Image: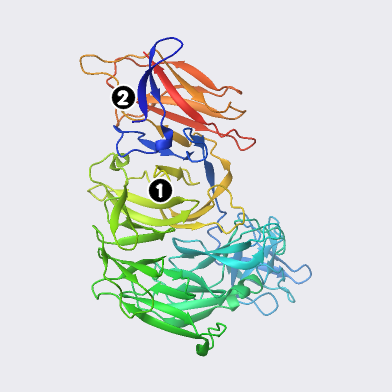
């Protein structure tokens, strides 16, 4: 429980005290905290702070399909009716052009020097080589739309931070329509202005091998980006992304894979090999000893689409490395350990449920997101046990059905996503966000809601940010609501009461002895600064909406007291809602709530 009854040492009065926030969300609202969102409980033990928020990455504007333009050879500029939504570094593709001298039809370029109706085009993403407009022309262009996130990869680059000696990382996303995208790790001023950090840039693979609007796969290996379509692998050299025009440097249908609705999740393992899910098997890409990888020279690599065969009735869904073994999950209830040398796997590890959605490896254990009951399993490579059951009570229904999204390990936290339906397959729109479990304390909370402002939708992609000093929790989250989008955890806290804690459902009375309270008080670990707020609300059961009791915005306040606006209750649940400010925040450390009869 996160509450107790204790005597006030000054007044001698018995008080109901709500604290225990460090315990996170309990298995039941009768056993502890019922819900906790957008709250940090790891930095300051026994206190709950407003967490860093998420901010949406600027997406390419929609509706720019076959848009008419005119070009001017004197200025090198392109003119359209309106550039609303354009941003520096955004990609567009010329569809038609009336002649030579103003770009090539079918080629993707990058926008810079934007005004209300004009812009310039740049051939390269990073080195700032402008498109030479030698003849004034007319034509049409389209802006590629960001679709449904499918997979992501974060991989080291060859660029180092001089102050830390650490190298930056590339972060690439893939959508189910087969388009590849890059999220920039640091600002650039090379492409007709400043390409903002965390900008979304299309990589120009318009001619990709056939995609089927399903889970695909993306990986980086030996400074090449590989995109796994349904039955083919496309690739591009990283240097041709950073120092060239990506659209003209893709190589399509390099290798053949086996079609699978489960996609082709891939991993670059410690034996310097690339492994990928390939229907009822695992494919591999190995470097020939002493060679430098060159995808155009088969003497430098060995490609095997069936390096490991799974049972014919199973299909690979995910894989992770634990020690020397790869752990391979499938649609059945088995995990196949493979030493990557033998032609067969070791004795399978049996999970209590079918369908292994994701496996996340840490130092000596791997966490398994499997089945439809909301259970996370743990394995040391030899045994499988239950690690954590996600609380059904948050669903406000009986026996909800869970669908796991994706999961990552970062800063000693398991970050993961999920979606939930009731027994009638009706979606419960209360789960879209980033959930976290601290691996030291095993406490659960929702660390981040998403920028579009609701808990509806899904989060198919989670990936660490590629920055030396990432903001917030350091995560990119690819989400799908009515449209697709990407959030990143920001350096500023939530500012609009998004941080909430719902207490236990506390049995304060009985049918024959209902309880009435006189006032309620909250205590903070830090005084409020200008722009910060605390609000307390209540309800008498798990179904009713919360009713506000009072709120405080007083600068310097460490506590406040409100008179109760209810009486004669049998059950009591308190919601604390609070927010910080973008400038010089205190992060509002909630310490406890006291209620007096």
Under tag 1, what secondary structure? loop
For the residue carrying disc 2, how many other residues have a C-alpha within 10 Å: few (<14), some (14-19), or many (20+)?
many
Q: Are marks 1 and 2 in contact (CB under 8 Å)?
A: no
Helix, strand or loop at mark 2:
loop
Q: Which residue is mark 2?
A: 540
Residue 144 location (% of width, % of height): 54, 65
- Which residue is more in the foreground, 589 or 79? 589
First-in-chain label (1 vs 2):
1
**Which percent across, then down, holds residue 328?**
34, 68
Q: Is the residue marked by circle 1 packed among few (<14), some (14-19), or many (20+) residues within 10 Å?
A: many
User: Going by the picture, which residue comes out furthest to the top?
Assistant: 11
Residue 11: give x, y in percent of width and height. Answer: 44, 9
Q: Up-down: is 186 above or below 430?
A: below
Residue at the image position 72 percent from the left and 71 percent from the top: 129
Q: Which mark is residue 446?
A: none
Q: Nearer the viewer, residue 508 or 19?
A: 19
Determine if residue 508 is in view.
yes
Answer left or right for 442 relative to 144.
left
Q: Is residue 296 left or right of residue 352?
A: right
Which residue lies at the image location 56% right of the left edge and 69% below the top edge? 203
Q: CA distance from mark 1 to mark 2?
A: 26 Å
User: How is the protein colored in the picture?
Assistant: rainbow
Query: Which image quadrant is residue 65 in?
Result: bottom right
Question: In front: 87, or 575?
Answer: 575
Q: State which quarter of the image contains the N terminus.
A: top left
* Quarter the C terminus occupies: top left
Q: Which residue is mark 1?
A: 432
Give the image quarter of residue 241. bottom right
């Amino acid at each position: 429980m996160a509450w107790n009854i204790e005597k006030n040492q000054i007044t001698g009065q018995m008080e109901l005290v709500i604290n225990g926030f460090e315990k996170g969300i309990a298995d039941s609202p009768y056993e502890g905290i019922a819900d906790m969102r957008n709250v940090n409980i790891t930095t300051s033990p026994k206190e709950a702070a407003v967490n860093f928020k998420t901010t949406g990455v600027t997406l390419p504007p929609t509706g720019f399909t076959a848009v008419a333009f005119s070009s001017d050879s004197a200025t090198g500029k392109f003119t359209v009716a309106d550039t609303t939504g354009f941003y520096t570094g955004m990609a567009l593709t010329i569809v038609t052009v009336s002649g030579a001298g103003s770009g090539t039809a079918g080629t993707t370029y990058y926008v810079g020097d934007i005004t209300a109706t004009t812009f310039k085009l740049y051939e390269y993403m990073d080195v700032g080589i402008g498109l030479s407009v030698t003849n004034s022309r007319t034509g049409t262009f389209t802006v590629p739309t960001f679709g449904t996130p499918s997979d992501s990869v974060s991989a080291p680059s060859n660029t180092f931070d001089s102050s830390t000696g650490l190298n930056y990382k590339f972060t690439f996303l893939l959508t189910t329509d087969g388009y590849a995208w890059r999220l920039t790790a640091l600002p650039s001023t090379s492409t007709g202005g400043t390409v903002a950090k965390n900008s979304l840039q299309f990589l120009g693979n318009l001619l990709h091998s056939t995609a089927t609007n399903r889970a695909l796969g993306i990986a980086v290996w030996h400074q090449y980006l590989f995109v796994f379509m349904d039955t083919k692998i496309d690739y591009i050299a990283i240097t041709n992304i950073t120092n060239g025009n990506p659209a003209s440097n893709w190589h399509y249908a390099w290798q053949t894979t086996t079609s699978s609705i489960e996609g082709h999740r891939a991993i670059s393992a410690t034996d310097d090999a690339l492994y990928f899910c390939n229907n009822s098997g695992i494919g591999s890409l190995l470097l020939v000893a002493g060679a430098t990888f060159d995808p155009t020279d088969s003497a430098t690599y060995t490609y095997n689409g069936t390096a490991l065969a799974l049972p014919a009735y199973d299909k690979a869904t995910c894989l992770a490395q634990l020690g020397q073994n790869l752990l391979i999950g499938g649609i059945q209830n088995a995990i196949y350990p493979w030493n990557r040398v033998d032609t067969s796997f070791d004795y399978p590890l049996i999970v209590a449920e079918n369908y292994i959605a994701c496996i996340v490896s840490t130092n000596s254990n791997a966490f398994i997101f499997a089945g439809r009951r909301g259970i996370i399993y743990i394995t040391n490579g030899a045994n499988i046990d239950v690690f954590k059951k996600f609380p059904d009570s948050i669903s406000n229904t009986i026996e909800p059905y869970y669908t796991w999204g994706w999961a990552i390990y970062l800063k000693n936290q398991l970050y993961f996503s999920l979606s939930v339906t009731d027994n009638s397959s009706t979606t419960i729109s209360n789960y879209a966000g980033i959930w976290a479990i601290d691996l030291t304390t095993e406490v659960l909370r929702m660390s981040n809601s998403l920028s579009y402002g609701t808990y509806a939708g899904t989060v198919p992609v989670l990936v660490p940010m590629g920055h030396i000093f990432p903001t917030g929790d350091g995560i990119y989250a690819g989400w799908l609501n009515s449209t697709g989008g990407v959030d990143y955890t920001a350096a500023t806290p939530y500012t609009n009461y998004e941080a909430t804690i719902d207490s236990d459902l506390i049995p304060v009375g009985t049918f024959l002895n209902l309880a009435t309270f006189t006032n309620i008080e909250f205590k903070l670990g830090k005084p409020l600064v200008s722009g910060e707020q605390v609000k307390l609300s209540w309800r008498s059961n798990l179904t009713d909406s919360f009713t506000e009791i009072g709120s405080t915005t007083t600068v310097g306040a460490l506590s406040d007291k409100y008179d109760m606006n209810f009486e004669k209750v049998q059950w009591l649940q308190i919601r604390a809602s609070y927010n910080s400010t973008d400038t010089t925040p205190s992060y509002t450390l909630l310490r406890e709530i006291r209620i007096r009869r």
